[in-house]
Each structure stands twice: as structure tokens, then as C-alpha cells.
């Protein structure tokens, strides 16, 4: 069964729900938007180090982390609203035809993780500036109607981020000029953390002997997670989008 259409539906539904929350028409955006970052394993970890104690508000981030150890980077490929927005921009701008930077460079994200964790240990909570759920929530708050904007901004602990975090969001989208999912492949610290968690995950990409090495999967992989030998996989980069299994002419690829 092709998973591509199902993944797109899930992505759009999640994005739509989050945007509706941000409009303040159905539920209180001021109450809900700060919870976005509490489902981020990155914010869960750095807040734990910054506070030097377990913070139960971030229990959702712990759940996402352990799920990612079973379903490697499913959050990046199926749920993350920033990833969905990047996919939309990539599609509209034909980013797949640009290959200026094709290497995943997930090690860069790991270095960012190390730096953010070290900063948190010294009580500098900088992770929110690069965490996709956090800067996405702040971007929604920034574009709220004036009567609600101050209320929502006050719901966040940080100050002075009204322009910085939306700029980071649009910067992540602008990186599409370098190729598909460039932010996700090179810089996203949350993606790097989830990549580490899912390196030995249970439902990983597997290729059987029916593979004819046609190279279609390698050319179409949005994360350049498939090396020259298509039987191999750069697991820290794979976001379990299953696009490779959808286009395989021999049905040689499965996840499990």
C-alpha cells in the first residue's frame, strides 16, 4: 500500500489543527500555543538541565522521544508542522531539481544539540530559538490579530522573541534554495536528537534481494538518506516518509 497519500493527509491535518488553534477562534490560543514546545524532546531535555529537576509539563516530549526510538524520526516525516511547511515550499518551488547541498550533514545538528545542552547546563535556555515547535508557535502568535497578540506573547516565558523566532521559521523555509528539506537535513537540532533516538529503531528501512539497484529511491529521497548502495540507509537522516518504498518498481523496500 502506498503511504505517500496517507502521510500527506496526516501532515495537512496536523498543520490545519495547529493553525486553527493559533487563530483563537475555537480554543484559547494563549492557553494552547505554549504547549507546542512541551511536546518537543529537545525542549524537554534542555529544560531538564536548565531547571536541574524533572518538569512534568514536558511529559509529551518524553513520549515523542520514545516513540521515535521505535518509529525512527516519524515525527519529522509525518507530524512536524515546520517539516510540512518545508515540504509545501519544496513542492511549489521545485526544490527537488536543486542539489547544491545533497549531503545530510546530520552531524551538524548533533553539534547544535551538544551546544544547546551545554548552554542549558549553565542555565542558558537557548534551545527555544532553534526548536521547530517553539518557533512555529511563536510565528503563529506573531500573526495573531492585535487584540490577542499581546496576550499570547505574554503566555511565553521568553521576551524579545517577537521578531527573532518568526525570522528563524521563514529562514528555515528559505533554505529550500539549497535543496529539499535543507533545514531538516543540516540544522534542525530536534531532528538530530530524534535521529539519534531512532538509529537502532524497530521499524527501519530494509531492502531485500529483489532490488535491481535502479537508483530511483536514491534520487527521490528528500533527506538523501540512501547512499550509492541502495541496500544501505543513513538511518540518522531517514524520516520514515516511505517515499522510497512507494516508488520502488520491485517492491523491494519495506519498513519493519
Image (cartoon, grey):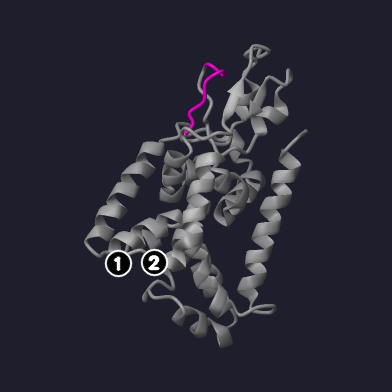
Q: From the top left corner, tell me how far across and down residue 207 is, in percent.
A: 61, 20
Determine whether the residue tagged by mark 1 lies in a helix, strand or loop: helix
**127 relative to 181 in the view: left or right:** left
**Which residue of the protein is positioned furthest toward the right in this rendering?**
1
Is the residue marked by circle 2 packed among few (<14), some (14-19), or many (20+) residues within 10 Å?
A: few
Determine whether the residue tagged by mark 2 lies in a helix, strand or loop: loop
Q: From the top left corner, tell me how far across and down residue 146 is, in percent.
A: 56, 85
Does any portion of residue 90 appear in the rendered image? yes
**Closer-to-camera residue (255/227):** 255
**Closer-to-camera residue (150/250):** 250
**73 relative to 112 in the view: left or right:** right
State the residue position of label 2.
55
- From the image, give the main secondary structure of the stretch colored magenta: loop
Q: From the top left corner, tell me how far across and down residue 200 is, in percent.
A: 47, 32
Q: Is residue 156 magenta?
A: no
Q: Are marks 1 and 2 in contact (CB under 8 Å)?
A: yes
Write the residue at 68% across / 79% down. 25
Write the residue at 36% across / 41% down. 108
Magenta-drawn segment = 229-235
Q: Which mark is residue 24?
A: none
**159 relative to 178 in the view: left or right:** left
Does 45 sit above or below residue 33? above
State the residue position of label 1.
51
Q: Which quarter of the rendered picture does the N terminus lie within?
A: top right
Amino acid at each position: 500500500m502506498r503511504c505517500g497519500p496517507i502521510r500527506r493527509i496526516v501532515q495537512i491535518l496536523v498543520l490545519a489543527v495547529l493553525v486553527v488553534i493559533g487563530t483563537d477562534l475555537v480554543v484559547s490560543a494563549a492557553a494552547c500555543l505554549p504547549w507546542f514546545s512541551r511536546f518537543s524532546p529537545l525542549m524537554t531535555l534542555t529544560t531538564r538541565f536548565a531547571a536541574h529537576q524533572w518538569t512534568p509539563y514536558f511529559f509529551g516530549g518524553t513520549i515523542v522521544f520514545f516513540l521515535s526510538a521505535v518509529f525512527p524520526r516519524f515525527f519529522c516525516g509525518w507530524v512536524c508542522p515546520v517539516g510540512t511547511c518545508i515540504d509545501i515550499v519544496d513542492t511549489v518551488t521545485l526544490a527537488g531539481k536543486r542539489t547544491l547541498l545533497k549531503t545530510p550533514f546530520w552531524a551538524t545538528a548533533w553539534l547544535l544539540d551538544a551546544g544547546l545542552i551545554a548552554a542549558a547546563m549553565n542555565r542558558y535556555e537557548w534551545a527555544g530559538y532553534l526548536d521547530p515547535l517553539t518557533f512555529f508557535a511563536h510565528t503563529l502568535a506573531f500573526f495573531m490579530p492585535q487584540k490577542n497578540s499581546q496576550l499570547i506573547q505574554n503566555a511565553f516565558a521568553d521576551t524579545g522573541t517577537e521578531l527573532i523566532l518568526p525570522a528563524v521559521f521563514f529562514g528555515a523555509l528559505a533554505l529550500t534554495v539549497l535543496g529539499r528539506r535543507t533545514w531538516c537535513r543540516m540544522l534542525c537540532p530536534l531532528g538530530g536528537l530524534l535521529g539519534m533516538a531512532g538509529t537502532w529503531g524497530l521499524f527501519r528501512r530494509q531492502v531485500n534481494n529483489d532490488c535491481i539497484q535502479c537508483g530511483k529511491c536514491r534520487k527521490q529521497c528528500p533527506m538523501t538518506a540512501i547512499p550509492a548502495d541502495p541496500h544501505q540507509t543513513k538511518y540518522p537522516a531517514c524520516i520514515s516518509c516511505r517515499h522510497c518504498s512507494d516508488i520502488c518498481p520491485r517492491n523491494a523496500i519495506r519498513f519493519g
